[in-house]
Image: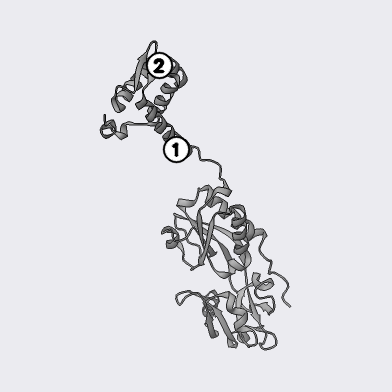
Amino acid sequence: MDYMSKIDHLAVDAALLKTLVILHEEQSVSLAADRLGLTQSALSHRLARLKTLFGANIFVRSGRKIASTPEAEGLVAEARNVLTQIERMVNPQPLMLEELTDQFVIAATDYERHLFLINACKALLTEAPRVKVGLVWEKYDNRQGLRDGMFDIACGPLLGHTDPDIHSEVLLEDRFLCFFDEEHAKRPETVDTYRHARHARVIFSRDDSSFVDNALSVNGFRRDIAIDIPSLSEVPQVIRGTPLIVTAPSRLANSLMNDFARCPVPFALPELSFGMEWHERTNSSPRHLWVRSTIREFARTGSLDGHRSEG
């Protein structure tokens, strides 16, 4: 009998599958009713539903008990698998890092990479040796990329967006310093010295605004941009041996910009909040919680402190 083609699949629920398994194990309506906490009348009703759905011959009488037929035994094996899957859905298993094979994609600028992300990624790969981590370039507005699933986390400057489907967390604060080769560049101690000097500007696309230029324009000033470069990593090579000045986050002073003189920016600039953003769909995922926790740990305790005194 091809009973499967006649089954109304929506009529099968977890309680009915559990009844099938318990009846098979107990081979007794009364004992099965006791295990399920049902009256014999209620269990008999479920047994009737089972026979309607799967065929009258799944259980047969055997004296005062019932006996499972080969058809029932096949159904019971499938029912146990389904119930196990439902149990895992309702009660998620503990996160087993050594068994994870996921890929996590993180968007970030080289600022976050230099300070904490590379070490955070190493820690992720050590704890879960089978996962894959992808680092892609961060754009200042990554919200659509998070929505589209292009990446899981975006690290970068937080610009105060309040989209309800995007979560964010501040990881660290920073301020700007002027960096320069003191053998070739003049220290920009005043606004006039600063705006008349030649500058290397780090800008990630033609559409990106510059915090520095926006602050200058408020007072009607502009600076002399000699070269735009697409990443912080190229700054040392660009300004070494030149009169160029670069205005960059101060935490780079003890790492990428360690070889260069530095001084405060001679006008008011807002502090920068760097953080991470992620989409609502991964907000409660244990594996994504683990990734974000690791990034948070290295951002707050494993990043280099660039706030040394400016000489």
Q: Nearer the viewer, residue 254 or 199?
A: 254
Q: Callout 1: 10 Å neighbours few (<14), some, many (20+)?
A: few
Location of the C terminus (image quadrant): bottom right
| Rendered image quadrant of residue 22 | top left
Q: What x and y, as percent, mark residue 28? A: 42, 16
Snapshot quadrant of residue 60: top left
> In the shown orientation, is residue 210 left or right of residue 180?
left
Label 1 sits on residue:
85
Q: Amino acid at mark 2?
A: Val
- Residue situated furthest front in the rendering: 70
Closest to the observer, 44 or 58: 58
Asked which quadrant contains residue 243, the reply is: bottom right
Q: Quadrant of the N terminus?
A: top left
x, y percentage for residue 168? 52, 57
- Amino acid bearing label 1: Gln
Residue 283 or 56: which is nearer the viewer?
56
Secondary element at image label 1: helix
Q: Check the image and report above or below for 273 versus 31.
A: below
For residue 95, the mark is none
State the mark number for residue 29. 2
Instruction: Write the residue at 53% across / 47% down.
Output: 286
Q: Position of residue 197 (x, y in %)?
A: 60, 87
Residue 236, placed above or below residue 140: below
How far apart are the alpha carbons under marks 2 and 1? 26 Å
Residue 166 coordinates in the image, percent (x, y): 47, 56
Image height check: is 36 above or below 83?
above
- Residue 18 horizontal side relative to residue 304, left or right: left
Q: Nearer the viewer, residue 1 or 76?
A: 1
Sequence-wise, the earlier of marks 2 and 1 is 2
